[in-house]
Amino acid sequence: MKLRLLTAAAALTILASFGASTSAVAQDRYCLQGRIWGYPGNCQFASYAQCMASASGTQAYCGINPRYAFARRYRGYR
C-alpha cells in the first residue's frame, strides 16, 4: 500500500513539473555580468529586479541576454 502511494505521488510530481515549465527564452532575459561572470554572464534571471538583487553588493551589473535580444521573432509568411 505504501509503495503504491509513493509511486502515485512521484508520478504526480513528475507530471506537475512538466505542466509548470516555461520556455527557456522567457526565463533568461537578463544576465548578471561583470569581471567574475564575463560575457554574457550568468543568464538565469527572468526579471531585471531578480538580477539586480543578485548583483547587489558585488561589482556586477545586469544586461539583457544577447540570445533573447537577438532572437528571431516568428513573423509568419508575407
Image: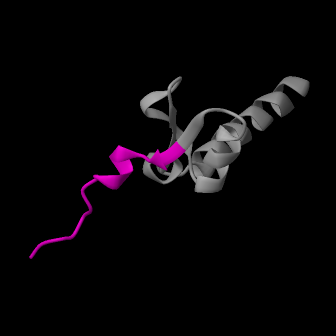
Left or right: residue 48 compared with residue 12: left
Quadrant of the rendered structure where residue 7 is? top right
Front-most of 53 and 16?
Answer: 53
Q: Is residue 1 visible?
A: no
Q: Residue 50 in the image: x percent, y percent?
A: 66, 49
> Could you tell me which residue is drawn at 83 percent across and 29 percent down?
6
Q: Is residue 69 magenta?
A: yes
Q: Is residue 16 magenta?
A: no
The colour mode here is one colour
Q: Is residue 9 above or below residue 25?
A: above
As drawn, the residue found furthest toward the front would be 59
Left or right: residue 59 compared with residue 43: right
Q: Which residues are magenta?
A: 62-78
Quadrant of the rendered structure where residue 56 is? top right
> Could you tell me which residue is drawn at 29 percent across and 53 percent down?
71
Q: Is residue 65 above or below residue 6?
A: below
In the rendered view of the protein, which quadrant contains the N terminus? top right
Front-most of 74 and 63?
Answer: 63
As drawn, the residue found furthest toward the left would be 78
Q: Is residue 71 above or below residue 44?
A: below
Front-most of 6 and 28?
Answer: 28
Q: Is residue 61 visible?
A: yes
As drawn, the residue found furthest toward the bottom would be 78
Q: Residue 51 in the image: x percent, y percent?
A: 61, 46
Q: Residue 45 in the image: x percent, y percent?
A: 57, 45
> Could you tell me which residue is drawn at 53 percent across and 49 percent down?
27
Front-most of 60 and 41?
Answer: 60
Quadrant of the rendered structure where residue 72 is? bottom left
In the rendered view of the protein, which quadrant contains the C terminus? bottom left
> Could you tell me which residue is drawn at 84 percent across and 24 percent down?
3
